[in-house]
């Protein structure tokens, strides 16, 4: 049994390719780990606020010195951090917007990358405090960015790998649905990504799904 955290960021509902693929990943994880507890943080339905002065002040104020306003300012961040730290497996749905992340997903990152909670800084540099987790990042993009002429425009996957690694989550698998708006690949893009998911969670020989 595992604790699974699913982070959705697309506002497109049932039309969202990233949401369809995160569901496939979640179904695969449930087959591998029956009885797992699942928490879904839907950033489209319940967006976290972008950081303001009060949140930043609260981050850098020791807990025992926070007044009620600072405790209130950091409450949502603490909830998001607690969910992340409790998870064994993390599934992130990340549609590509303008070569990067939806702002709702970036806001979640800003709430969970916290000094003293998910990383520390010392004489030897940064140390991630969220180690030991496995992350699956599902991306969906109109063009192809993993290779070819637009590879240098991918500021999404390198950033997510770096920021997750910074907090200690270094075991990250990317599953990409690419070329969804490209007439050469749009008809096969989802099927290709779905095939990668199926292969990733295929049951070993002799084991029933």
Image (cartoon, grey):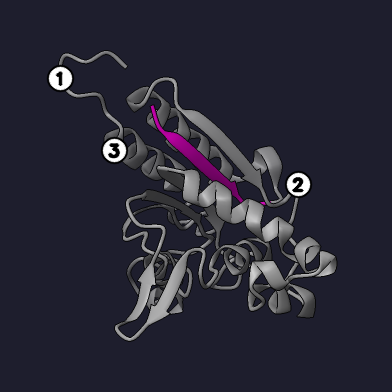
Residue at label 1?
205
Label 1: element kind: loop
Crowd class of label 3 (few under 14; some 14 to 19; many from 20; radius 10 Å)? some
Asked if 184 appears above or below 156 in the picture, the reply is above
Residue 150: x and y in percent read 42, 75
Predominant SS along the magenta part: strand
The magenta stretch is: 1-10
Residue 43's mark?
A: none
Which residue is painted at 60% across and 72% down in the image?
Answer: 98
Residue 200's mark?
A: 3
Residue at label 2?
45
Asked if 80 appears above or below 124 in the picture, the reply is above
Of labels 3 and 2, earlier in sequence is 2
Crowd class of label 1 (few under 14; some 14 to 19; many from 20; radius 10 Å)? few
Q: Answer whether labels 3 and 2 touch (C-beta < 8 Å).
A: no
Which residue is painted at 75% across and 49% down in the image?
Answer: 46
């Amino acid at each position: 049994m595992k604790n699974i955290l699913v982070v959705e960021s697309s506002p497109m509902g049932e039309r969202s390719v990233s949401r369809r693929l995160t569901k496939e990943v979640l179904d695969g994880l449930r087959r591998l780990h029956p009885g797992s507890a699942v928490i879904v943080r839907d950033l489209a339905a319940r967006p976290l606020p972008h950081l303001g002065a009060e949140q930043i002040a609260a981050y850098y104020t020791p807990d025992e010195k926070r007044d009620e306003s600072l405790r209130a300012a950091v409450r949502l961040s603490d909830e998001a951090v607690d969910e992340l730290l409790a998870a064994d497996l993390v599934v992130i749905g990340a549609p590509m917007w303008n070569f990067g992340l939806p702002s709702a997903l970036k806001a979640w990152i800003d709430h969970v990358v916290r000094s003293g909670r998910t990383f520390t800084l010392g004489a030897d540099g940064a140390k991630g405090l969220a180690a030991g987790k496995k992350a699956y990042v599902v991306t969906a993009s109109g063009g192809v960015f993993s290779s070819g002429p637009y590879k240098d425009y991918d500021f999404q996957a390198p950033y997510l790998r770096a920021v997750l690694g910074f907090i200690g989550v270094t075991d990250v698998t990317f599953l990409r649905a690419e070329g969804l708006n490209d007439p050469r690949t749009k008809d096969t893009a989802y099927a290709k990504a779905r095939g990668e998911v199926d292969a990733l969670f295929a049951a070993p020989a002799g084991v029933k799904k």
